Amino acid sequence: MKKINVGLVGVTGYTGMELTRLLEGHSRFELVSVTSRAEAGKKLHAIYPFLQGMPSGEIVITEPDPELLAAKCELVFLAVPHKTAMEIAAVLLEKGLKVVDLSADFRLRDQEIYEHWYKCTHTQPQLLETAVYGLPELYAPAIREARLIANPGCYPTSSILGLYPALKHGMVDTKGIVIDAKSGATGAGRKAAVGSLFCEVSDSFRAYGLPTHRHTPEIEQEISAIAGDEITVSFNTHLLPINRGILSTIYTTLVQDMTLDDVHAMYEEAYREHPWVRVLPAGVLPETRHVRGTMFCDIGLVVDRRTNRLIILSAIDNLCRGASGQALANANLMCGVDLQEGLRLAPLMP
């Protein structure tokens, strides 16, 4: 079967690193071009020794060049910061390529909201109308037809999947939703920064970004669409002293008289056709280690009758399900490849 050539712009960050790992095991996609201004001229195994002896390890890193990418690739992943991605995406789309953007540049449909939260001008607003939000459980049919995918953020993936059945079925009040989310240190990126040094993160636990985390409008946009109502959430983020993983604890208020069995049955039905969302048995709560390195989103449910709350717990791996693995899933759909190709991964235990 014919291989599909793909490129990766921005190979040196954690999401670029994770994508190279996943693409190495993909039967249909062949990584043929990787870019980095800082590491251009080196073979990929020189910066990622874990690729020694593997085909992609022999790829020579080049500087970003849309002409070169267009000549070699059918699809390109953009693992670069916001503001940078929008410019590269526009050029690649003009040249007829398909693009999966892992930055935030096309996630928000409203230009003004993007510019307010990201403090920069969106130079390609015409593309906001054509970009498809890449959450396969919600938007697979549109993803299949898309040329530009806005790959969801890690926190939003965990939060939206956790809330989807509750909002879809009107189980909970749309007012007063609180999302208490914690992420491993890789969520801060691979850049050198004091706040993510080992000695700053290890043996500690802290909140950050309150109440201005940039994933807030992304979550509100998507859950408002699910509920058919404008929703404002209290979104609160914390840094865990671990490498990978996100655990979101979501506090909602029930508006229906429902038992845990009722809620559990509705969640199971909502995700029955979606193998990566695992609704855990009643009384079992998710842990980040049980999804490490995978596409799984593990959901645990608690009904507190005393406070009339439905507490939803959602665990994902921030690098795989929350970024690179999800990008690969979107690329699979765009290219007519089986959704799970390259992503049938068991958790990395212990």
Image (tube, grey):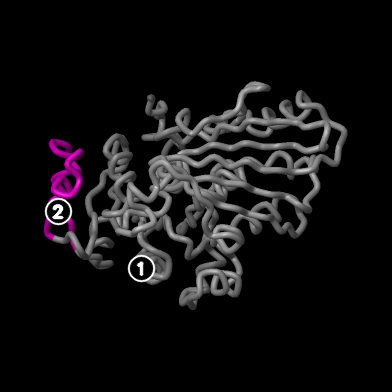
Q: Does residue 117 appear anywhere in the picture?
A: yes
Looking at the figure, which quarter contains the N terminus? Answer: top left
- 26 relative to 222 in the view: left or right: left
Residue 143, numbered label: none
Kindly identify which residue carries mark 1. Answer: 88
Identify the magenta region. 41-62
Determine the residue positioned at 42% across, 66% down. Answer: 82
Residue 103 in the image: state x and y as whole percent.
43, 60
Q: Could you say which is closer to the camera, residue 302 or residue 241? A: 241
- 170 relative to 6 in the view: left or right: right
Vertical position of residue 57 compared to residue 147: above or below = above
Residue 344 in the image: state x and y as whole percent.
41, 29
Kindly identify which residue carries mark 2. Answer: 60
- Residue count near mark 1 (Cα–Cα under 10 Å), binned few <14, some 14–19, many ≥20: some
Residue 55: within the magenta? yes
Under circle 1, the secondary element is: helix
Please name the amino acid that badge 2 sits on.
Answer: Val
Residue 152 in the image: state x and y as whole percent.
51, 52
Q: Does residue 75 appear anywhere in the picture?
A: no
Vertical position of residue 48 compared to residue 149: above or below = above
Under circle 2, the secondary element is: loop
Please report whichever mark, 2 or 1, sits nearer to the chain's N-terminal start. Answer: 2
Please name the amino acid that badge 1 sits on.
Answer: Ile
What separation in Å lies between label 2 and label 1 (alpha carbons)? 20 Å
Vertical position of residue 88 compared to residue 201: above or below = below
- Residue count near mark 2 (Cα–Cα under 10 Å), binned few <14, some 14–19, many ≥20: some
Looking at the figure, which quarter contains the C terminus? Answer: top left
Determine the residue positioned at 53% across, 45% down. Answer: 182
Determine the residue positioned at 40% across, 29% down. Answer: 345
Q: Could you say which is closer to the camera, residue 282 or residue 210? A: 210
Q: Quadrant of residue 114?
A: bottom right
